[in-house]
Amino acid sequence: MSYTQHDLKATYDPQDRSSWADFVLYTEPGSDVVTTGLHFDTRIEHTSPYVQEWVRRLRRSTPNALHALLVANQEMPRLFDTCATENPESSSVVGGAGCTCLRTLTDPQFGTPVVAEHYRTASGSTDRWAYETLSPINLRDGESVVVLVIDRGTFWARTSRDVLCLLPQRRANGYNVGYSGGGPWALAAYLQQLVDSDGKDTAALRPGGGSPGRGLLEFTTGESDARSQELTLDQLKAIARS
């Protein structure tokens, strides 16, 4: 069944009790792999104040079909295992006190699934979590981007509702900075769209879409801009004019 963009409600709004969102899945005949058709699959392995702020709002949830998109087929049973900290008899327990569980969560702001991957050694000397989730492809009606956050390879937006979220992007766009390539070009094109619309046009561009100016393209491809930093919309406008 074919569709066009206007057939889809791509963004969930927790302030609207009747809100819902569509998620498009993609597969091929004869393939045992199902992936997202629109949303970009984002992995977060580091910790930072931005990651911590985002993690604090996540809510535990029962595994569902969207969580299954974020793991390999053979890993799906692990979504139902408990953490070693909650059940010492869990199949996730390694070496008596270690843990390799998967925990399913939901971002209540956007309705997006999150799978948290726990890795703890038996000695406890290493105890860390990594997160797999889907980036939104747009913000809510009337919501705009006011701050861009570059956070060690993860790209966040602070919105006009003072919500920290992953920067909207589509599957296959893969934002990046610090070199000449498709990732920095895609990010520059999206930032150009924000600058031109005063932060209001937040819909993620289709792969290859947009036309970034020289200022923003030089910014995203420059090595010095790979560091963690926050940039307001006014600062992005100044970069675009440079």
Image (cartoon, rainbow, N blue to C red):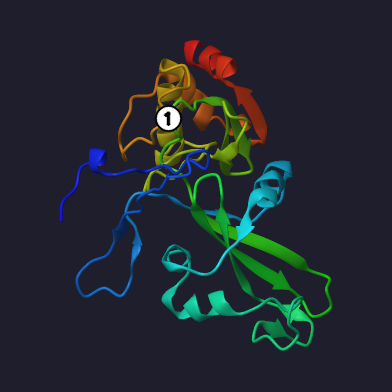
**Percent x, y for residue 40?**
42, 50
From what the image shows, is residue 200 above or below residue 58? Answer: above
Q: Quadrant of the N terminus?
A: bottom left
Q: Residue furthest front?
A: 17
**Image mark count:** 1
Residue 226 visible? The answer is: no
**Percent x, y for residue 106?**
55, 56
From what the image shows, is residue 144 above or below residue 242? Answer: below
Tell me if mark 1 has few (under 14), some (14-19) or many (20+) residues whose alpha carbon lies within 10 angstroms of its own: few
From what the image shows, is residue 204 above or below residue 68? Answer: above
Residue drawn at (79%, 82%) of the image? 97
Local secondary structure at mark 1: loop
Q: Amino acid at mark 1?
A: Asp
The residue at which mark 1 appears reads as: 141
Residue 55 visible? The answer is: yes
From what the image shows, is residue 87 above or below residue 69? Answer: below
In the drawing, does residue 205 fall left or right of residue 161? left
Residue drawn at (48%, 44%) of the image? 17
- Identify which residue, 8 or 79, lies in the foreground: 8
**Percent x, y for residue 57?**
66, 49
Q: Residue furthest left?
A: 1
In the drawing, does residue 164 fall left or right of residue 218? right
Quarter-of-image position of residue 88: bottom right
Residue drawn at (62%, 30%) of the image? 162
- Identify which residue, 115 or 61, lies in the foreground: 61
Residue drawn at (39%, 24%) of the image? 212
**Percent x, y for residue 227?**
66, 36
